[in-house]
Image (tube, rainbow, N blue to C red):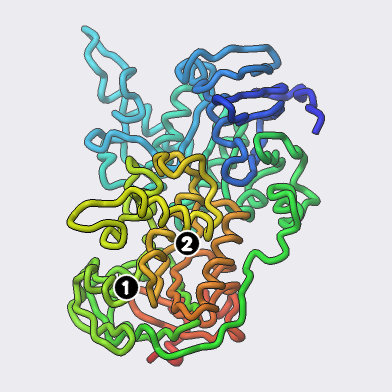
Amino acid sequence: MKPSAPGPDAVLALEDVSKSFGAVRALRGVSLSLAAGEAHALAGENGAGKSTLIKTLAGVHRPDTGTVLLDGRPVAFHGPADARDAGIAVIYQEPTLFPDLSIAENIFMGRQPRAALRRIDRGATRRATAGLMRRLGVDLAADRPARGLSIADQQIVEIAKALSFDARVLIMDEPTAALTGSEVARLFAVVEALRAEGAAVLFISHRIEEMFALCQRVTVLRDGALVSSRPLDGLTEDDLVRSMVGRDLDELYPKQPAALGDTALSVRRLTREGVFHDVSFDIRRGEIVALAGLVGAGRSEVAQAVFGVDRPDAGRVEVDGRALRPGSPTAAMAAGLALVPEDRRQRGLVMDMSIERNIGLTGLDAVGSAGLVSRTLEHARAADWAVRLRLKYSRLTDLVGVLSGGNQQKVVLAKWLATRPSVLIVDEPTRGIDVGTKAEVHRLLSSLAAEGLAVLMISSDLPEVLGMADRVLVMHEGRLTAEIPRDEADEETVMAAATGRTEAKGAA
């Protein structure tokens, strides 16, 4: 696509920018213009070049060719401090606050207002913080410690910090990935207030519906190149997906028919005091059962108790008709259970290990003997699963941390599928991954079920629940409130059960 000149109201722009890392061309002649008072979406699959573009705007990377423009004039940022001083702030998905300092101290770290004899004026610091919170329309006390703040509140503190630098451009990289619906609504209200003050906002998200809700324009990248940059008004979600993946995505939820077999997992009256109570359900071979509900309903906690990460206070779990020893992940694995956790980086992977070593962690006995691991067997095992799951990588010996989020998720899946489980528990299987990879994960889950695997899928993505599940189990405040067959499940019935407005139906 031919680059377009920045508009007269452009605060920050890129013109024909390219950036390479060795033989990899991360950006290829990309142009982007951010206007005052506008929220601009940046879309693309993992690996499309979004992160490199953000880091170029933020002064982390300098372009190999092309120009960065600030208020229409060329500018060279020699580091993030230069970009920050120019009024450009980046809010990342995972805020980086000092947990033992107060909100006020985090916002004004290293530049607190001074009183006589250069002593820190704590009163002025608190008053300035309170003013920023009023401006954002939120109620957070200046003296409150950062430790214990929710992710949503931590992001508000990061935004307040940006405003304290008089930021004119706010770049938000996946800010909603870990937020609840109400927290997203509050964040969007803050963004709207900043737009009204004339700030330019660049918004990056894998949630397409959020782009349409918040933004006025969208720029799409694919393989480091600019595909399109246009107003969202008049576009459909299908149009945007087609631009991102370069093809028609006929089926985001490719649910295959599967013959149901015997009961693979049976949970009876499982209880963990104060967390969930009297949870019972069965899953048959060939079946995908979704565990739905609002954040905090107890879904992940049930999965962890079933797998033995947490020990339940009461109840019974059976795999293929045999009782499972409670509180023992080792016994769960031996019985044929596998758990793909919600937090793949913290609980699913060892980030400073290679791709092949991560895949091999669950099957060390299969790739070695006498306590020694055969690198040849380990490599062959990883290579086999990399092909099966269409993993995109340079070398299997590379650290798993260099992979995109979607490919990291595939490594976690490979690690557990290599154990040949009879029951696969997947917690938020497509959170934080792009739409093309999401379709691949759905295809994989559907084909595994068709081969006779029993799948328990925990998801906060309601279209994913409706598109992939044979049955939907809904939790509310630690209890199962409904069991809904696929042909009766829709957004209204699931949300009614998730908010406690229906009684449990058909629960075992």
| The furthest residue to the top | 117
Residue 330 at x, y percent in the picture: 22, 68
To which residue does mark 1 refer? 302
Residue in the picture at 36% in, 50% down: 376
Q: Nearer the viewer, residue 143 or 35?
A: 35
Residue in the picture at 32% in, 54% down: 347
Q: Is residue 461 visible?
A: yes
To which residue does mark 2 refer? 429
| Amino acid type at image mark 1 | Val
Q: Nearer the viewer, residue 148 or 114?
A: 148
Tell me: residue 422, above or below residue 282: above
Question: Seen in the image, is 47 located left or right of residue 354?
Answer: right
**How far apart, in angstroms, are the residues tagged by discs 2 and 1?**
16 Å
Q: Tell which circle, 2 or 1, labels the residue nearer the N-terminal end.
A: 1
Residue 62 at x, y percent in the picture: 56, 18
For the C terminus, the quadrant is bottom left
Question: Seen in the image, is 183 located left or right of residue 220?
Answer: left
Element assignment for label 1: helix
